[in-house]
Structures are given as structure tokens and as C-alpha cells.
Amino acid sequence: MISDVFLTGRITKVLNKTTRYVEVERLVPDQGKYVVDNIPVSFWNKEPNSFFMKLNEGTLIVLRGRIQNEEQFGIIVIAEQLAVLGEKSLQPQGG
């Protein structure tokens, strides 16, 4: 069986050398508000110096990938394609 996943969200916390959280909002219909889910994501090549790992926190991305079960995190998404939609830091900038 093949899984295919699309995520649109913001890059957040680094979990290890090859895995980061992607923060994704979803609407809860009964409550009419958004809830944030943090989904662990690894880039397909698992390189510590990959473009994915160098993105700033807060960067808006869209990715296509697959679901995989890993011992350390449980179910994660392996990103196969990645597009940057915009960069915005989560920390306020002085100026």
C-alpha cells in the first residue's frame, strides 16, 4: 500500500539532526476554531545539512511525502517534495 500526504504549515522545532516539526492548523468543526498539530517530518535523503534542516523557524512550506513508522517518533512524514511559500521568523525582530 502506498501513502501520499500533502502538508501546508510552518517549520518549527528541530527534533534531531534530520527531523523537525511542521506546525499545521486544522479546523475543529464543532467548536469553530483552529487547533495546531505538530507533525514530525524528515526529508527523504536524511542529510543533516539538507535545505529542509536549514530553513528558519516560521518558514511557510508545502510538502508532499509519505507516512512512515519510525522507532524514535512513531508515525512521521517523509518529505519527498518541498516548496517554500514564505519566510517569517517566529521570534520578533528588533529594529
Image (tube, rainbow, N blue to C red):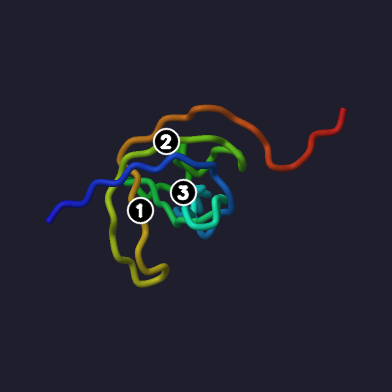
Instruction: From the image, state whether disc 3 or disc 1 is nearer to you.
Output: 1
Q: Which mark is residue 16?
A: none
**Dot 1, how many residues are within 10 Å of its Cα: few (below 14), some (14-19), or many (20+)?**
many
Q: Please state the horizontal and vertical placement of residue 77, each as a whole percent of the image.
A: 35, 53
Residue 14 position by quadrant:
bottom right
Question: Residue visible at 33% across and 36% down?
Answer: 81
Mark 3 lies on a secondary structure that is: loop
Q: Are marks 3 and 1 in contact (CB under 8 Å)?
A: no
**Dot 2, how many residues are within 10 Å of its Cα: few (below 14), some (14-19), or many (20+)?**
some
Which comes sooner in the sequence, label 3 or label 1? 3
Q: Amino acid at mark 3?
A: Pro
Q: Are marks 1 and 2 in contact (CB under 8 Å)?
A: no
Residue 1 position by quadrant:
bottom left
Question: Residue visible at 42% across and 52% down?
Answer: 41
Mark 2 lies on a secondary structure that is: strand
Q: Residue furthest right?
A: 95
Give the residue number, with chain letter if any, for mark 3. Answer: 48
Give the residue number, with chain letter if any, for mark 2. Answer: 62
**Dot 3, how many residues are within 10 Å of its Cα: few (below 14), some (14-19), or many (20+)?**
some
* CA separation in Å, label 3 and label 1: 16 Å
* CA separation in Å, label 3 and label 2: 20 Å
Mark 1 lies on a secondary structure that is: strand
Q: Is residue 63 above or below residue 38?
A: above
Question: Residue visible at 51% across and 53% down?
Answer: 21
* CA separation in Å, label 1 and label 2: 12 Å
Give the residue number, with chain letter if any, for mark 1. Answer: 77
Q: Is residue 43 above or below residue 39?
A: above
Residue 26 placement, left or right of 91: left
